[in-house]
Image: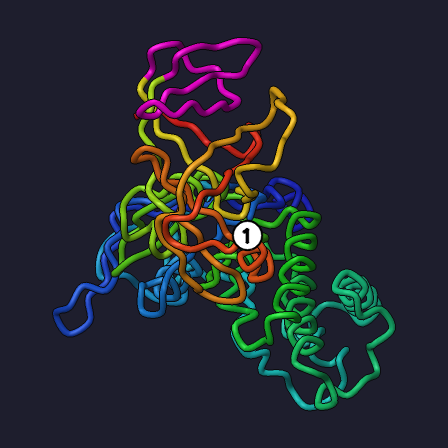
């Protein structure tokens, strides 16, 4: 089979997975992952605190490091560090761009020159990659004059220009200020979605992970302790540690009481919550709502009753300040719902333990799964 036919026979995106991965350093286990699968053409965000094992797992899946035991698969076949053909289909973006002296074009085209891509094709691919990251026409600029955000865009272009089947991003925005990080995370998410590359995106930032992820995993002490679509992982934490790490509360237990046209009414210890679901009447369920989807009002404020909105009158149980927003825990007969509100909203409502509030959230914001 010639090179052109071989390329046509190879899928544009990779199906990457691993099983029974273990890594031990000096007798201490730092990675213990039974299985992981990266969805082809999607971004898997791996979230966890520093030292959780995220970067170790990334290096193993990227064939940069050998596990103590276990296997990595590309397109269903085993792959390892010695598999140079597979390694050439992988590109990476790290915390620091590590740009070379010279022009932006020199940096972006570095990998293409190593692969002996002809000059005309190299220039075309460099221009296309720079345009994709918002730096069209920057080929002649000096890499030493770039800001942090510009340099990281160049690093992403340097990876994209290789047309990788697997893209690794290891804390690519960790050194950015909050405003720039937010902007770049949105841009990176759009680029990854449009390029349809299989990507593993490692971060310790929950908001960043939520923006970029098609699928999300949470790591703790070398293990993946939660995995699923981002909305489910964030709204339905599987244990108290995950709930605390994600800044939310444990799911509420309930039972489906009625179902009509795709909307179910769930009884949660006497509190009624409406959600979109096709679960059968009588099904025991777990119910969750992300704090940012819960809006607080004074209990005296009249709100028109609608079929797509929940309103729960309760009492403030706790108030904390994890950052620029306030976290308010509302208790309704033992059922607890968390709300993230601005400081001005908290001040205008005079929220304090014992004060009465109305918690309002849409049925579309409610996540439900069988218990």
Q: Is residue 253 visible?
A: yes
Q: Nearer the viewer, residue 310 or 356?
A: 356
Q: Nearer the viewer, residue 347 or 211?
A: 347
x 50%, y 68%: residue:
171
Is most of the magenta stretch helix, strand or loop? strand
Rendered location of residue 241, percent (x, y) = 28, 53
Check residue 282 for magenta coloring: yes
Check residue 274 for magenta coloring: yes
Q: Would you name the residue on which mark 1 appears? A: 349
- In this rendering, would 326 be left or right of 189? left
Q: Which residues are magenta?
A: 256-283
Q: Is residue 89 visible?
A: no
x 63%, y 66%: residue:
159
Q: Nearer the viewer, residue 329 or 93?
A: 329
x 34%, y 22%: residue:
270
Q: In the picture, which quadrant includes the C terminus?
A: top left
Rendered location of residue 113, percent (x, y) = 69, 74
Residue farthest to the left, as pictured:
27
Disc count in the image? 1
């Amino acid at each position: 089979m010639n090179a052109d036919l071989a390329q046509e026979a190879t899928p544009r995106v990779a199906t990457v997975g691993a099983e029974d991965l273990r890594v031990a350093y000096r007798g201490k286990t730092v990675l213990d992952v039974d299985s992981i699968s990266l969805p082809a053409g999607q971004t898997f965000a791996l979230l966890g605190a520093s030292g959780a094992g995220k970067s170790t797992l990334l290096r193993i899946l990227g064939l940069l490091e050998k596990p103590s035991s276990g296997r990595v698969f590309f397109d269903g076949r085993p792959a390892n560090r010695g598999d140079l053909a597979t390694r050439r289909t992988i590109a990476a973006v790290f915390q620091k761009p590590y740009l070379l002296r010279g022009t932006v074009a020199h940096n972006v085209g570095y990998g293409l020159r190593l692969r002996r891509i002809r000059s005309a094709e190299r220039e075309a691919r460099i221009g296309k990659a720079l345009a994709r990251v918002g730096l069209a026409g920057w080929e002649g600029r000096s890499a030493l004059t770039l800001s942090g955000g510009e340099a990281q865009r160049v690093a992403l272009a340097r990876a994209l220009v290789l047309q990788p089947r697997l893209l690794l991003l290891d804390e690519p925005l960790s050194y950015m200020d909050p405003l720039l990080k937010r902007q770049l995370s949105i841009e990176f998410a759009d680029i990854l979605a449009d390029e349809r590359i299989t990507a593993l995106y490692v971060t310790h930032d929950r908001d960043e992970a939520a923006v970029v992820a098609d699928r999300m995993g949470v790591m703790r002490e070398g293990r993946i302790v939660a995995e699923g679509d981002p909305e489910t992982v964030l709204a339905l934490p599987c244990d108290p540690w995950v709930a605390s790490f994600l800044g939310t509360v444990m799911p509420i237990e309930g039972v489906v009481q009625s179902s009509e046209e795709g909307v179910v009414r769930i009884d949660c210890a006497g509190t009624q919550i409406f959600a979109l679901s096709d679960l059968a009447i009588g099904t025991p369920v777990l119910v969750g709502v992300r704090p940012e989807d819960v809006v607080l009002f004074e209990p005296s404020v009249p709100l028109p009753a609608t079929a797509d909105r929940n309103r729960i009158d309760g009492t403030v149980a706790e108030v904390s300040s994890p950052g620029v927003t306030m976290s308010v825990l509302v208790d309704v007969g033992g059922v607890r719902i968390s709300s993230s509100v601005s400081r001005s909203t908290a001040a205008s409502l005079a929220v304090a333990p014992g004060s009465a509030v109305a918690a309002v959230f849409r049925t579309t914001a409610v996540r439900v799964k069988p218990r």
